[in-house]
């Protein structure tokens, strides 16, 4: 598709301690959506930077069709796709974003989207630099 991909990593970003498999799955999902929905010769940008003392952020931006504001919450629900007609142009199951949100929560983080219809989309994941401590058990 002749997409241009740019990666910008903040040199101040420290090493983080997290579940690498879950982290990779979130990134794959966001990146493959960006590739899928961006028309030929578009631009995808992946940026990572430190967020305060305890978190980092990674954002995947594209120059695709964007997502109307009214749909920006429901796309994170299971099996939800904005174009669900039989003739839809893009494949997929509608599971990627709901899985990504669950994985981000498991890692103690959160995922969100910013977009304007016709102006591309930016999916942002904020994650703690250290894994969350498990809740102490109520049992003695
Ligand atoms: P799938 O990609 O398998 O359809 P997802 O859960 O990853 O499922 O995405 C759900 C829906 O959100 C997609 O079908 C699409 O309508 C919308 N969407 C996701 N990523 C983007 C994007 N980068 N640009 C435009 N729409 C998107």
Image: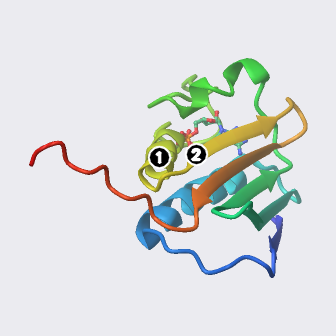
Residue 108 falls left or right of residue 113:
left
Quickly name the residue at label 1: 105
Q: Nearer the viewer, residue 43 or 135?
A: 135
Residue 6 falls left or right of residue 71:
right
Residue 46 placed where, x, y %?
A: 76, 64
Q: Nearer the viewer, residue 48 or 87?
A: 48
First of labels 1, 2 by sequence position: 1
Residue 95 placed where, x, y %?
A: 46, 40
Q: On the rendered image, what quadrant is the N terminus found in?
A: bottom right
Query: Residue at the location (62% across, 31% down)?
Result: 88
Query: Residue at the location (62% across, 41% down)?
Result: 90
User: Is label 1's Cβ within 8 Å of ligand 1?
Assistant: no
Neighbourhood count class around disc 2 (C-alpha, 10 Å): few under 14, some 14–19, many 20 upward: some
Examine the image and state in which quarter residue 8 appears: bottom right
Q: Eyeballing the image, is 6 above or below 65?
A: below
The span from disc 1 to disc 2 (Cα, nearest Å) is 6 Å
Q: Secondary structure at mark 1?
A: helix
Quickly name the residue at label 2: 110
Q: Can residue 132 be seen here?
A: yes
Query: Residue at the location (31% across, 49% down)?
Result: 135
Q: Secondary structure at mark 2?
A: strand
Q: Can residue 87 be seen here?
A: no
Residue 11 falls left or right of residue 32:
right
Q: Are marks 1 and 2 in contact (CB under 8 Å)?
A: yes
Residue 51 placed where, x, y %?
A: 74, 60
User: Which quadrant contains ligand 1?
Assistant: top right
Residue 111 placed where, x, y %?
A: 61, 45
Q: Eyeballing the image, is 61 above or below 24?
A: above
């Amino acid at each position: 598709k002749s997409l241009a991909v740019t990666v910008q990593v903040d040199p101040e970003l420290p090493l983080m301690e997290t579940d690498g498999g879950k982290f990779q799955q979130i990134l794959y999902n966001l990146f493959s959506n960006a590739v899928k929905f961006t028309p030929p010769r578009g631009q995808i940008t992946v940026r990572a930077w430190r967020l305060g003392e305890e978190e980092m952020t990674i954002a995947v931006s594209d120059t695709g069709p964007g997502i109307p504001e009214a749909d920006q919450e429901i796309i994170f629900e299971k099996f939800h796709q904005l174009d669900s007609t039989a003739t839809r142009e893009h494949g997929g199951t509608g599971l990627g974003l709901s899985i990504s949100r669950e994985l981000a929560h498991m890692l103690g983080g959160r995922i969100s989207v910013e977009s304007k219809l016709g102006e591309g989309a930016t999916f942002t994941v904020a994650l703690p630099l250290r894994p969350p401590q498990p809740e102490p058990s109520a049992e003695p």
